[in-house]
Each structure stands twice: as C-alpha cells, then as structure tokens.
Image (cartoon, grey):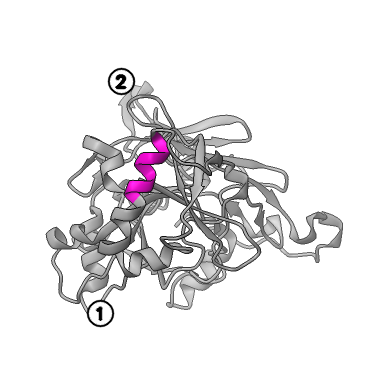
Amino acid sequence: MKLATYKDGSRDGQLVVVSRDLGTAHYATGIATRLQQVLDDWNFMAPQLQDLYEQLNQGKTRHAFPFDPTQCMAPLPRAYQWADGSAYLNHVELVRKARNAEVPATFYTDPLMYQGGSDDFIGPCDDVIVPSTAMGIDFEAEIAVVTGDVPMGTDAKDALDGVRLVMLANDVSLRNLIPGELAKGFGFFQSKPATAFSPVAVTLDELGDAWKGGRLHLTLQSTWNGRKVGMCDAGEEMTFHFGQLIAHIAKTRNVRAGSIVGSGTVSNKGVETGSGKNKRMEWPKGYSCIAEKRCIETIQDGAPKTEFMQFGDTIRIEMKGKDGQSIFGAIDQNIAPPGGSKDDLPEVQPLDSSED
C-alpha cells in the first residue's frame, strides 16, 4: 500500500491512503489519523489500511478525492530518529580520490552514519529554505526506510524484518559549513538543514522483485533546473544494505517504531574510456549530488567547475518502476531564502567547501 500525510494545520498532519497510480486518495479516518499511530500498532492497523487501499484501487470507496502531492507533508512529518548512512562507498571513494586520499579500510566493514534533525521534516513540494547561497547548497538523492521496533543486538538479516515502509529523500547539505563542523570532531549539525521526503511511503510488496537483499534495484532520477543529471542504479552498488544499516544502529540500543534510516547519496562507479593518453574516466549514470559532480570534475580536469545551487534553482527526485510509472511520486522543490527575498539577507562570507 501507499501512504501519505496531508497538511491540515497541525504538526503531524492527516494520514491518507493513496492509490497505486497516485491518482486518488482517501483519508484513513476511522483507522488512524497519523502514520506514527500505525507504526506503533502495525499488526493491527496495517491490515485495515490494506483493505482500504484495495478498495481505493478498485474504485469502491465513497469518499475518494484526487491526490495532490503539493498538499503533502513528509509521510512521517516528525520522527523519533533520522539516521542517515553512507551505504554507497563509491561516493566516499570519489571524495577521497579527488583529494588524493585513501579510503580507510574500516569504511568497507562498518557503515558511516550521522543523526539528522527529525523534528522538522519538510514536504516533497515545500521550498528548501537556506539563509545564504554562500553556505554551498546541495541536494542529495537518497532512499530511506521507516522501521518498526528492532531490539538491540539484532543482526543484519533479522533487522530487515523491521522495515515497514520505503520512500525517497532529499537530504539537503550545506557543503561550505561542513569543513568547520568536521574539524570539531563531532560530525554534521548546522550543515544539515531540514530533509524532504517523497509524497508517499510504500510497503515492500509494492516494490515486487525490485526489493531484493535489502536493496532497491531501480533507477533514481535527479533533475536539476529541468536537466536530468542523475540516472543512478540504487541497487547493485549499495555496499551496505538496509538490514546492515539498521543493525549498525541496533548494536548498542533499541530502534523504535518510527525511526527513519537513510541510504546516503546513491552513487555509481565510473567507467574507463579511451586508451593511452586519451584514457579517461567517465560517469555515464550521472550524479545524485553536486558535490560528487565536483569531485568528478576534479578527477577529470584538476578542479571543480560546477557551482552549488542558487536561489530559484529547482530539484526533482523520482523513481519509476519497471512499468514506467512513478512509485513514490516526486520530490519537486525550489531553493529559496528566508522570507522569499534575497534583499533581506545578511552578508555571509564564503567558506572553504568540502565534498563529504
């Protein structure tokens, strides 16, 4: 089934069930008003929502209405935990190669992970509000899962049983704030503003055989200012699957229902073209964040050329099934300053950028 949360003036919104083709929706009133309620009592409430979903797809509901993604909050507008991994090690390898640095051996056995802000997610069509473009605004196209309860000490195989829903994410990064924060030795904080998620979150059965081994084997599309810049395979090159990411969290603590776990930037390896002096690395599947594009440029040409995002830029992130239909709906956002006017902004001096 497919679930979304509609804006209603409250912080947690109103739970709606959305048809498979994303054409119609129906309030889940009488079953649950908020998604967190469902996650807390999944075995009881999920079958009821599934029945409503099937009726909606068959056109048998009495109060269906056209689904409008612009009215959506994040599927789970507030979460108990938002833990984002770096499961695609090609992304890390690119960053390190651009700096002529080696990837530590432990990166291949132990996932990188940071804990983002989970109190204030934004909807799929809400503006990305950033104080200044000098902060180095970047999108990051990712996959995320919402969990049920996963006990401390659960291994990676069993942790997969804790996956309840899957969705897309735009994990916005402020690249020019990252170096100073990492230098403190305590990880990301101000450099990670509010994250946006896709209009709908879906259960695993909606993904069919594309969900295999804790990975989603489909193409994640990123379109920046109307130009498609990424067609990245989200499956094969995911070093750590979602069971491993969840088990990483659960090593020393319980993971509670309503936790969101992200994949990190979806990234694919380059291919070598040409021969002799004309030998060159190319990345035909594009990129899922600008920082990666800048690393590619550094590797190819010695220095980055692509600038980070400006006010007025747009980013669209979407994934389609093997039938060509959108699965989660699209994250479709504008980059904007506070209040919508650049004239009101204080001067912020550019900082040294980082591609991590």
Q: Is residue 38 left or right of residue 290?
A: left
Disc tally is 2
Q: Quadrant of residue 35?
A: bottom left
**Residue 71 is inside the magenta segment:** no
Could you say where residue 272 lies in the image, as x and y percent from the top left? 31, 28
In the current view of this chain or complex, which residue is farthest to the right?
343
Residues 88 and 36: in front is 36
Mark number, residue 275: 2
Label 2 is placed on what type of residue? Answer: Ser
Label 1 is placed on what type of residue? Answer: Arg
Kindly tell me whether residue 205 is visible in this rendering.
yes
Query: How packed is label 2: few (under 14 Cα within 10 Å), some, or many (20 or more)?
Result: few
Q: CA distance from mark 1 to mark 2?
A: 52 Å
Residue at numbered disc 1: 253
Identify which residue is drawn at 31% across, 63% down.
Answer: 112
Identify which residue is drawn at 62% across, 49% down.
Answer: 71
Q: Is residue 157 left or right of residue 265?
A: left
Could you say where residue 250 lies in the image, as x and y percent from the top left? 23, 73
Could you say where residue 157 lies in the image, as x and y percent from the top left? 13, 58
Q: Could you tell me what secondary structure mostly forms the magenta stretch?
A: helix
State which quarter of the image contains the N terminus. Answer: top left
Q: The residue tagged with tag 1: helix, strand or loop? A: loop
Query: How packed is label 1: few (under 14 Cα within 10 Å), some, or many (20 or more)?
Result: some
Residues 170 and 12: in front is 12
Q: Is residue 225 above or below residue 240?
A: above
In primary-sequence order, the first of circles 1 and 2 is 1
Q: Is residue 156 above or below residue 226?
A: below
Could you say where residue 165 lies in the image, as x and y percent from the top left? 33, 53
Identify which residue is drawn at 51% across, 33% down.
Answer: 229
State which quarter of the image contains the C terminus. Answer: bottom left
Q: Which residues are magenta?
A: 50-57
Task: Please identify, in this view, whether the residue under mark 1 or under mark 2 is nearer the observer.
Answer: 1
